[in-house]
Image (cartoon, rainbow, N blue to C red):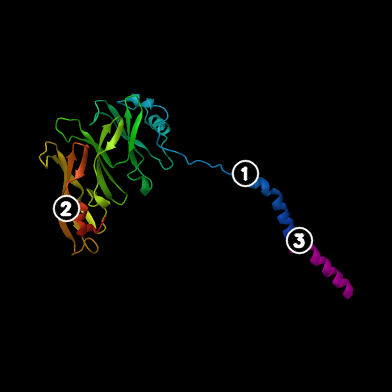
Amino acid sequence: MIRFLGAMLYLLLVNSNPYKELSSIITRQQSIAPADTASATPATGSYTPEPVYDYQSVPFTAIKQYPLIKDSAAFIKALQENCHIYTLHHHRVTINYFKKVKFYGSDLFYYLLEYDFHDGSNASFPWKDQYLFTISGKLVTRLRTMRLSLLRIFPDAKPFLFGVSATAKGNGWHEIYRINKDTVEQLMEQFRGNRPLTYDGYDDNDINSPFEFAHTCTDQNLDGYNDIVFTGTIRYSSVDMSSIYDKSRKVKLTFLYHPETGHFVPMEDYSKKYAYIYGETW
């Protein structure tokens, strides 16, 4: 009887051997591994290139609809395809304006339109782009500003494109653009360390009042060329803002026009001048 029970126990252990079952599973996996590996891993030296956006292969012929866009949905789709716009989060898109403009540096007309996708990541703020095309539909540039307008700095000359931009937090700046040999050139040289800011709506330890400083175009150094001047107030504190420790300082930030380069350059080292507000920024 004891021998019989021992024999039965031996057979039971052999038939339920977990290592035997595991060995069988491994064998089956190994038999399919080469095919899986080949399909999942590219051959040595090959790669999948990252997609490229915001470029043009052929002219944007739908631009000829100016001044009226007959079918907004079709126009937007054509623009997205022609300029290879990254549209992953563009769930609602509008064309805010569609203009024919002339600006400093050229006697030619250009088409300027604003493509507004209304929402997105902080990196894509302010969630709208401005596209500049030649009359034939060639893309000249894409800008990303909160507001883009025409600013006449010199009374007897064409206006410049004037943009104000900011991060999603509210740290911002201004830029001035002209046409230079069929490209768009940015002419406004920024401060060292990007401080102070001509636009600042970020309430950390300092903030502009108003957020966007007012600007005027006057000849500050009496050289016969108008310069651009920003004025406003900086509120700041060594502790949290909106406390009894807040201080205010009226500022005037002058960018002098340099005719030899065509650039607008800070008249002083404002980063150093206002280091007591911002700290060392260089």
Determine the CA span between mark 3 and mark 1.
30 Å
Please, what is the three-letter code of the amino acid marked with disc 2? Thr
Please, what is the three-letter code of the amino acid marked with disc 3? Lys
Residue indicated by mark 1:
39
Determine the CA span between mark 1 and mark 2.
63 Å
Q: Is residue 42 left or right of residue 90?
A: right
Q: Name the spot of residue 177 as percent of width and height, x first.
A: 26, 37
Secondary structure, mark 1, is helix
Q: Residue at x 72, y 59 (%)?
A: 22
Query: For the residue carrying disc 3, how many other residues have a C-alpha within 10 Å: few (<14), some (14-19), or many (20+)?
Result: few
Residue 233: mark in rendering: 2
> Is residue 161 a member of the stretch shown in magenta?
no
Residue indicated by mark 3:
20
> Is residue 11 a member of the stretch shown in magenta?
yes
Secondary structure, mark 2, is strand
Q: Name the spot of residue 90 as percent of width and height, x first.
A: 40, 40
Please, what is the three-letter code of the amino acid marked with disc 1? Ser
Sequence-wise, the earlier of marks 2 and 3 is: 3
Q: Name the spot of residue 44 as percent of width and height, x first.
A: 59, 44
- Image quarter of the N terminus: bottom right
Residue 279, picture quadrant: bottom left
Q: Is residue 240 left or right of residue 26?
A: left
Q: How many marks?
A: 3
Determine the CA span between mark 2 and mark 3.
80 Å
**Which stretch did the figure color magenta?**
1-21
